[in-house]
Amino acid sequence: MRDAIRIDGLTEFTRNLAQFEAALPRALRLATGDAADAVVDYARPRVPRRTGRARQSLRATSIGGAVRLTEGGPRAPYMPWLDFGGRVGRRGSVHRPYLRRGRYLHKGYIVKRDTGVIQKVLSRALLNAADRAGIEVT
């Protein structure tokens, strides 16, 4: 005859793990939105300003499970030119040096990634989701 193995708290742990799994997608979506907002907050004051429309066109939007950073739009159609450069005007009479990765949003992402801000935001969201599910993480 085999001895029965008994694990105290396994049922509660399994229940908490299911709650964590259910809460995880929403927590990650909110955290990636917060991380994208940090990138926009870095980039916005660095955009040249005349009317403020170009600065205000920087946005972080959540679409499904992804976050998208956008710039420009109908009120500031020149914003991509400010960010990436190129030639505009009659026969390309106005020139701004072209930068493949841009001057503002991508640089903001690199700075926030390298300083650990994005990792901190995502880690905090995971820890909060685990805490709400009753899982203690040390």
Image: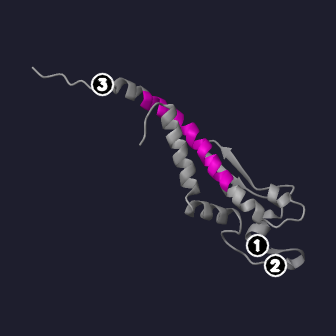
Task: Decide: few, some or many residues near mark 2? Use Cα within 10 Å; few <14, some 14-19, many ≥20.
Answer: few
Instruction: Name the amino acid type tagged 1.
Output: Gly
Which quadrant would the N terminus be assigned to in this image? top left
Which residue does the image show at 80% across and 55% down from the upper left? Answer: 57
Q: Position of residue 78 (x, y in %)?
A: 83, 64
Asked whether the residues under the numbered discs 3 and 1 touch, taking CB atoms below 8 Å apart as contact, a structural biologist would say no
Cα distance in 3D space between marks 3 and 1: 63 Å
Q: Residue furthest front?
A: 138
Q: Position of residue 114 (x, y in %)?
A: 56, 63
Q: Tell me the residue that label 1 is attached to.
A: 85
Q: Position of residue 28 (x, y in %)?
A: 56, 43
Q: Position of residue 112 (x, y in %)?
A: 61, 60
Task: Decide: few, some or many residues near mark 1? Use Cα within 10 Å; few <14, some 14-19, many ≥20.
Answer: some
Main SS of the magenta part reads helix
Cα distance in 3D space between marks 2 and 1: 7 Å
**Magenta residues?**
16-38
Q: Nearer the viewer, residue 102 or 89?
A: 102
Q: Is residue 25 left or right of residue 82?
A: left
Asked whether the residues under the numbered discs 2 and 1 touch, taking CB atoms below 8 Å apart as contact, a structural biologist would say yes
Mark earlier in primary sequence (3, 1):
3
Q: Is residue 80 left or right of residue 17?
A: right
Q: On residue 95, which mark appears?
A: 2
Instruction: Name the amino acid type tagged 3.
Output: Asp
